[in-house]
Amino acid sequence: MRILFSLLLLTSLSCSKDNTLTTEPTPQSFVGTKSITYNGVNVNLVIDKPALKEVDVIIVYHGTVMYDSLILEASTSLIDKVKTILDREDMMIVSVAYPEQNLLMGDNILEAEAGLLWVKNKASEELGVTVKKIFLLGHSQGGYLVTRLNTMHQTNGVIANGPGPLNLVYRCQLEENGTIPNGITCTLLKNTYGTTTANPNAYMQRSLLNFTTGFKSDILFVQGLNDTPIQMYSWPTFKQDVMNCTTCQNSQFLELAGEGHSALFTSSYAKTEFNNFINTR
């Protein structure tokens, strides 16, 4: 895929203490893709940075696309979607193009984490900007990743839309008994661990139901109640487990009747609550 870089370079004049004119760089806008390495982990980031000296940042994680040839497109598309619901124009958006192909569910948490830590510790230096608040937003599998990241690192807040897979035991059993067609996710798990009957713990350890405690930051879950039957089968259990958490920061649930898997991006009410969540932290 062709990588697009767009840089706006400007300078301005100011006076030093001895009244001599000095040239100071003005903030640079940046729209493009950057390959980063953090703690030995490589990942591509798609970045949309405004021409400001100081920015709050929202780091976003796309949904499942299966093939790595599609992840840059998915990452760019998610930035566009977020910009349609975000009321502010002064935030930098960083989309983490985490890999999926031939990986077991959850193994890409390494790349997801690398993107977050780079923004926390390297973005200011490498992009010439002061990073202030950091938020995470994930859709679908991206929601799975940001929920897990919230058990690992503190940010200013997390938004997870339709996060999943919630219950890989249930989902993969449906494939094993022929109720639904076989998919790549469960096939890879079966080839590694055997069936859900033979090794259910291995499947559950990678399910989001296994990550419902220890949230380090406030988190907003958005769930359309007209989502798929597989998602909704385990949603009440997931919600209750999170609500029972005694080691979590505040967890909010926005459940939307008549909305599907993309509720955050299709509901005007979800848009309002999303912006309220960000602007009050």
Image (cartoon, grey):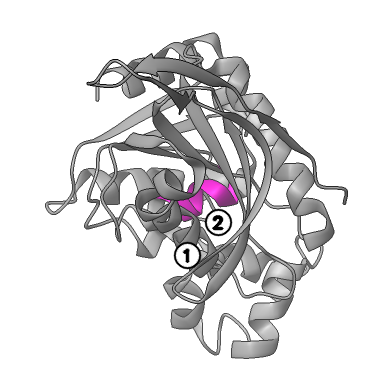
- Disc 2 crowd, CA 10 A, few/some/many (<14, 14-19, 20+): many
Residue 170: x, y in percent?
56, 64
Going from N to C along the chain, the mark reached first, 1 or 2, is 2
Report which residue position mark 1 lands on. 207
- Placement of the C terminus among the 4 image quadrants: top left
Residue at the spot 49% in from the left edge and 11% down from the top edge: 87
Which amino acid, mark 1?
Answer: Ser
Residue 213: x, y in percent?
24, 57
| Label 1 to label 2: alpha-carbon separation | 6 Å
Report the predominant secondary structure element of the magenta stretch: helix
- 156 falls in the magenta region: no
Report which residue position mark 2 lands on. 165
Which amino acid, mark 2?
Answer: Pro
Q: Is residue 94 left or right of residue 119?
A: right
- Read off the magenta span: 139-146
Residue at the spot 33% in from the left edge and 52% down from the top edge: 150
The residue sitting at the right extreme is: 2
Front-most of 217 and 49?
A: 49
* Whether label 1 touches label 2, CB < 8 Å: yes
Residue at the spot 60% in from the left edge and 21% down from the top edge: 83
Front-most of 196 and 34?
A: 34
